[in-house]
């Protein structure tokens, strides 16, 4: 069908649809009623299970038919699955900072992965970004520790090195968390903070699972605990156990796509989640443990400049490094035994900043003691209607190694506006009718676009957000030249993508 006819039909759909959003969580499931606020179980344990670079469509429970994720799929059947959950940024470090602090990357002035990379000849000079989480900022770990919780961070940190490690931000235990954003290899020997040695036969995801299980067994006997289980997987490099890779090669008939190594990495991560749940059962605390499973940004669409597709972003546009839906919309499963309805789903938009105020309230740790850009979404776990919120906002004033350019975005109801800093043009999408962001309505709905642009600008002012500036060294012929923060030159290729 010609594009004009398709667009006309789409406009007709819009005129027939109710564009005002009144979202709530579905009522399917086994329970007759949700537990009231002030749950009868006091001081639940909390496990935040964070998967790195996971695509929206990488899991069976989100429609994937190639990757095998039986344990995560079972968790989804036992829990509430969110369909409009967002990362706070399209890359790692700022997204993780928001999860832990409840603050927007713009407010934290930590908007790029650490340490970042410089493109000296792009059209804009990128905004400055902090090289570590600021000292003194309150994290969910510190807030829960003050309320009597044991706290542990196992796996990836990527929010600073010495002096800015998990133990400097409220965690009693830190295993393998340091400044590194990815492992040099998933096979030993390893050189992480508090995790060194092992052999070439040891697989990082399995080693972290062993550490996780040991911690849960020990902590469960002493009292409530908060575990930030932050997997390095499924971040590059693509490496997995041989037998598992061969299984997926046979499954796809020897083709390169879907990627059998990536699928094997996902399966290893799924096994880690299965081991966690089994350990919670053995420790006798499964019925009093909240599990949150999500990702820090969208999946990698392509590896370097070639067209070898890696992640499955569920038909959403683009991927990691972009503020299109493929770069920021995430799988999210919330499991609170006796409260979240098994098999339920929720289409309310939520974002990474929401986790701190939510988990602090659920754990009885009180309200945040610092400015908080998220809201308590605990009521959604009970099947209640959405809490009041103005809009969701993003600020990424950087060039990404995946091809993204400096961009800001706002989502209000079903409408999403993106503003591109290189030339200030905007794009406007209706996500209810066009989740793949194929139809730009910034001209057709110009007053709506201008209203959202104004709100986005006002929010950036409130956040004192740092902006990119014109680059006097702009040279289109050298636009892809890049260097590290120390000034060393890097080739623009898949082998040097650090985040």
Image: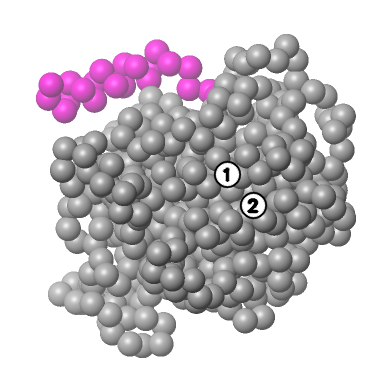
Q: Is residue 366 above or below residue 370?
A: above
Q: Would residue 196 appear left or right of 199 to someone viewing this image?
A: right
Rendered position, 306 above or below 437:
below
The quarter in which the C terminus is drawn is bottom left
Disc 1 versus disc 2: distance between alpha carbons?
7 Å
Q: Disc 2 marks which residue?
A: 213
Residue with the most extreme bottom position: 487
Name the residue: 71% across, 66% down: 173
- Residue 395 seen by the camera: no
What predominant SS class does the magenta segment belong to? helix
Display colour scheme = one colour
Which structural element holds mark 1?
A: helix
Q: Position of residue 26 (x, y in %)?
A: 60, 19
Residue lying at 54% horizontally and 75% vertically, measured from the top left: 196
Neighbour class for label 1 at 10 Å: few (<14), some, many (≥20)? Answer: some
Give the secondary structure at mark 2.
Answer: helix
On screen, 412 above or below 101? above
Residue 298 locus on image (x, y percent): 41, 48
Q: Are marks 1 and 2 in contact (CB under 8 Å)?
A: yes
Left or right: 350, with 244 as reference point: right
Query: 41 above or below 363?
Result: above
Q: Which residues are magenta?
A: 1-23
Between 188 and 404, the one lying in front of the other is: 188
Q: Is residue 21 magenta?
A: yes
Where is mark 1, residue-wise? 275
Q: Is residue 397 magenta?
A: no
211 or 49: which is nearer to us?
A: 211
């Amino acid at each position: 069908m010609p594009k004009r006819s398709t667009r006309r039909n789409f406009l007709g759909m819009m005129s027939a649809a109710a564009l005002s959003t009144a979202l709530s969580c579905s009522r399917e499931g086994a329970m007759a009623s949700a537990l009231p606020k002030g749950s009868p179980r006091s001081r639940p344990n909390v496990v935040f299970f964070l998967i790195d670079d996971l695509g929206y469509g990488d899991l069976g429970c989100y429609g994937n038919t190639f990757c095998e994720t039986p344990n995560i799929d079972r968790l989804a059947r036992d829990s509430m699955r969110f369909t409009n959950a967002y990362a706070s940024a399209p890359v790692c470090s700022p997204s993780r900072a928001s999860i832990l602090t409840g603050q927007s990357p713009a407010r934290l002035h930590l908007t790029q992965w650490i340490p970042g990379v410089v493109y000296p000849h792009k059209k804009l000079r990128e905004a400055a970004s902090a090289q570590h989480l600021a000292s003194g900022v309150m994290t969910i770990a510190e807030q829960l520790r003050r309320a009597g919780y044991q706290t542990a961070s196992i796996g990836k940190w990527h929010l600073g090195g010495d002096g800015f490690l998990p133990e400097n931000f409220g965690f009693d235990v830190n295993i393998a968390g340091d400044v590194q954003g990815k492992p040099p290899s998933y096979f030993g020997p390893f050189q992480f903070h508090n995790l060194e040695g092992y052999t070439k036969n040891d697989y990082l995801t399995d080693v972290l699972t062993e550490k996780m299980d040991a911690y849960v067994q020990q902590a469960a006997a002493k009292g409530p605990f908060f575990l930030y289980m932050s997997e390095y997987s499924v971040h590059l490099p693509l490496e997995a156990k041989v037998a598992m890779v061969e299984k997926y090669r046979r499954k796809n008939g020897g083709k390169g796509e879907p990627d059998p190594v990536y699928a094997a990495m996902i399966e290893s991560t799924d096994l880690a989640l299965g081991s966690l749940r089994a350990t919670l059962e053995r420790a006798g605390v499964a019925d009093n443990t909240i599990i949150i499973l999500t990702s820090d940004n969208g999946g990698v669409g392509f590896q370097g400049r070639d067209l070898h597709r890696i992640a499955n972003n569920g038909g959403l546009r683009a991927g990691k490094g972009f503020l299109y839906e493929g770069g920021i919309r995430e799988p999210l499963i919330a499991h609170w035994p006796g409260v979240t309805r098994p098999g339920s789903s929720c289409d309310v938009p939520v974002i990474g900043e929401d986790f701190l105020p939510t988990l602090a309230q659920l754990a009885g740790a009180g309200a945040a003691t610092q400015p908080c850009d998220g809201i308590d979404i605990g009521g959604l776990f009970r099947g209640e209607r959405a809490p009041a919120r103005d809009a969701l906002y993003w600020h990424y004033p950087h060039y990404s190694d995946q091809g993204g350019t400096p961009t800001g975005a706002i989502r209000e109801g079903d409408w999403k506006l993106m503003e591109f800093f290189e030339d200030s043009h905007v794009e406007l999408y209706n996500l209810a009718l066009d989740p793949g962001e194929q139809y730009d309505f910034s001209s057709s709905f110009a007053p709506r676009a201008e209203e959202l642009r104004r709100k986005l600008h006002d929010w950036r002012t409130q956040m004192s957000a740092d902006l990119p500036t014109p680059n006097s060294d702009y040279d289109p012929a050298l636009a892809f030249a890049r260097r590290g923060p120390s000034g060393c030159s890097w080739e623009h290729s898949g082998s040097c993508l650090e985040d």
